[in-house]
Every structure is written in C-alpha cells, then in structure tokens.
Image (cartoon, rainbow, N blue to C red):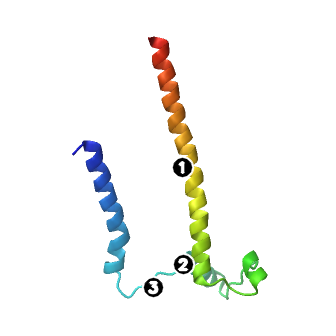
Amino acid sequence: MGEKKKKIIILLVIAVLIAIIPLFTLKGVEFGGSDDAGSEEISKIIGREYKPWFTPVMERWIGGELPGEVESLLFCVQTGIGVGILAYYLGRFVERSKHEDSKEKEMHN
C-alpha cells in the first residue's frame, strides 16, 4: 500500500473516531443546537430572558416553526450547494495548474 493511501486511511479513521467517541463517552448529555446555547448564555449575561431581534422569514411565511425534518432538508440542500461550488472551483484550480504545467513542459521541449 502506498504512503499516500496509508495517510488517507489514517485520517479517515481519525475523523470517524472524532465523530463517534463523544456519543459513547458522554452518556446522558444533551446535544443541543448552538442557537439554544447562545440564547441561554446571553440570558445569563443580561440577567433577563433573551428575545430574538427578528423572526426567520420562513417561519413568518408558514405561520410557525419549521418541522425538524424540513430544517434538516434545507440544511442539507444548503450544504450540497456549498460543496458543489467549492468542488467546482477546486476542480478549476487543479485543471488550470495541470494546463499551465503542460504548457511549461511544451515550451522547454
């Protein structure tokens, strides 16, 4: 097995362990969202209940909170769009580098 393959496998194993270990070591802990944690900390600092400055646009449209499944779907769509854009530009960068390298080789020959 090549050195590069070993490094990739080791990094993947580390990433999986980082995701799984907290689930087993922190039993009984509630994994809440950052919005809730932020609101709680602000309430502690100002000494009264925190009231958001605005209501999310989608909540106004449907007249209530979005169901959790819809929130997850929208988050996944947003993530997919972001990954697509990132992959597109990374691909362009790699191909441009290859193209420039091949031009340099042709010039030296």
* Image depth: mark 1 or mark 3 in front: 1
The correct choice, above or below, for 102 with respect to 11 in the image is: above
Residue in the picture at 21% in, 45% down: 1
For the C terminus, the quadrant is: top left
- Residue 27 makes an appearance in the image: yes
- First in sequence: mark 2 or mark 1? 2
Q: What is the count of numbered marks? A: 3
Residue in the picture at 49% in, 19% down: 104
**75 displayed left or right of 10:** right
Label 1 packing within 10 angstroms: few (<14), some (14-19), many (20+) = few
**Residue type beneath disc 3:** Glu
**18 displayed left or right of 107:** left
Residue pointed to by mark 2: 33
**x then y, percent, for residue 105:** 45, 18
Residue in the picture at 52% in, 28% down: 99
Residue pointed to by mark 3: 30
The correct choice, above or below, for 68 with respect to 106 in the image is: below
The correct choice, above or below, for 81 with respect to 104 in the image is: below
Separation of residues labelled 1 and 3 (CA atoms): 34 Å
